[in-house]
Amino acid sequence: MTITDPAFLRGLVRPRMARSTVSRRQAVQLLGAGLALAACGIEGQGGQEKVSQTDVQRYWSSKARTGRLSWANWPGYMQDDHETIKAFEKATGIKVSYKEVIQETGPWFGKIQAPLAAGQSIGFDLMVMTNGIQLEKCRQLGYLAPLDRSRLGNFAAHAGPGFKNPPWDPGNSFTVPYQSGITGIAYNTRYVKDEITSIAQLFDPAYSGKIGMMGDSQELGNFGMFLLGVDPEKSTPADWERAAAKLREQRDKGIVRKYYNQDYVDAVSKGDVWLTMAWSGDVYSLTSPDVRFVVPKEGGTLWTDNMCIPKTAENPVDAMTLMDWLYMPANNAPLTEFVNYITPVPATKQIVAADAAKATGNDRRDLTRLSTSPLVFPSETDLARLRYYRRLTQAEETKYQGVFGPITKGS
């Protein structure tokens, strides 16, 4: 899966460049913070490992529609004119207060943790969180409302198979996907004449000093395990140790120029590094047309931003109504055309293609490319090559960070 034409990636980074970078980095940097919170006593307030129908009925039996809701999201994840929100308001009569208040995953969790721990409203009925440590904390600590699947008929009918029953939320008990993205490899064809298809090429001494790897322990660990043919979701501590050994060897041989957070974008564009781990959306920001993005044959990481309802939400019925409404393909298509990330509603592809056929000029070209882009509408074969982060218990977090964290620090 290789993308070379910047027009193919129209808008991929517009909504999420800083967001994708920071959320991925913050998730791992705050491992220690999450463990510290647990040590302070907020752990064990009623974890949400399993949800029964009784739990669902107990939560929803007293809830009623109010005709309003407040939604917290990341910047640029909605059309500038709020076209989708306006359509929802017209269709349902529910008034939406939409605010782009989530800039980083860690600080957002820090902001909502105290009121949620106290059983108080956070001022939002719907929020979008990335699968990872902070979302797992919310789930474990009992901060999320259990979803009433009887109210999610559109999700059941139109969500792609790869977006149901995710490992971080079995049965979609608390979340449904909003958008997804991919971690793969970016390379500069001015310097790399071979076709890049494999993670093994990030370990090739021929590119010594010209390789970029991510400083995020989850991302770095995933690629180390991919190299060994290990599925991170099914990995063991022994697998982590083997992957870490390969990553240390790569570092100690001088193959890695730097472990990057966001600044790999400029580095690969300028040729400071020739190949680097990369997020699909960031590739759009590269000014050089020589930079390509590829999902390696061993696999890439699929991360997902998820809609969820705080347990203390004042308008949860209205929030769930919006969640399900977005899974109607006709309702999701305009959002997909703006955001350009992987949509969890694959049937929107036909609508985007139809819109392209009716469009003219640049709009027709861009929508046609969008409707055929494997970065927005990956095939089941493509999705089968993508993996998630390992879902970690508290004890596993400590072990995982102890194995992969020191690599980027030279120890």
Image (cartoon, rainbow, N blue to C red):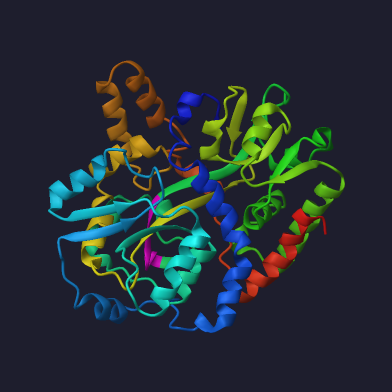
Q: Residue 25 lies in what quarter of the image?
A: bottom right
Foreground pick, 404 / 107: 107
The residue at the far top in this view is 361
Q: Position of residue 296 (x, y in %)?
A: 63, 40
Percent x, y of residue 15: 43, 40
Tell how many labels.
0
Q: Write the residue at 55% across / 51% down.
A: 22
Is the C terminus in the top left, top right, bottom left or bottom right quadrant? bottom right
Q: Does residue 17 sit above or below 131 in this rendering?
A: above
Residue 283 located left or right of residue 258: left
What residue is at 39 percent from the left and 66 percent from the top?
A: 171
Can you give x and y, in whole percent of width and height, for residue 68 in the image?
A: 19, 60
Residue under the point 40% across and 30% down: 370
Tell me which corner region of the image, top left, top right, bottom left or bottom right, holds residue 128. Answer: bottom left
- Can residue 154 be seen? no
Provide the residue span drawn in magenta. Answer: 171-178
Which of the image's four quarters has the N terminus?
top right
**Image quadrant of residue 222?**
bottom right
Q: Nearer the viewer, residue 148 or 281?
A: 281
Which residue is painted at 59% across and 64% down in the image?
A: 30
Residue 45 sits above or below residue 365 on the image: below
Q: Compared with residue 120, is residue 94 higher up or lower down, i.e. above or below?
A: above
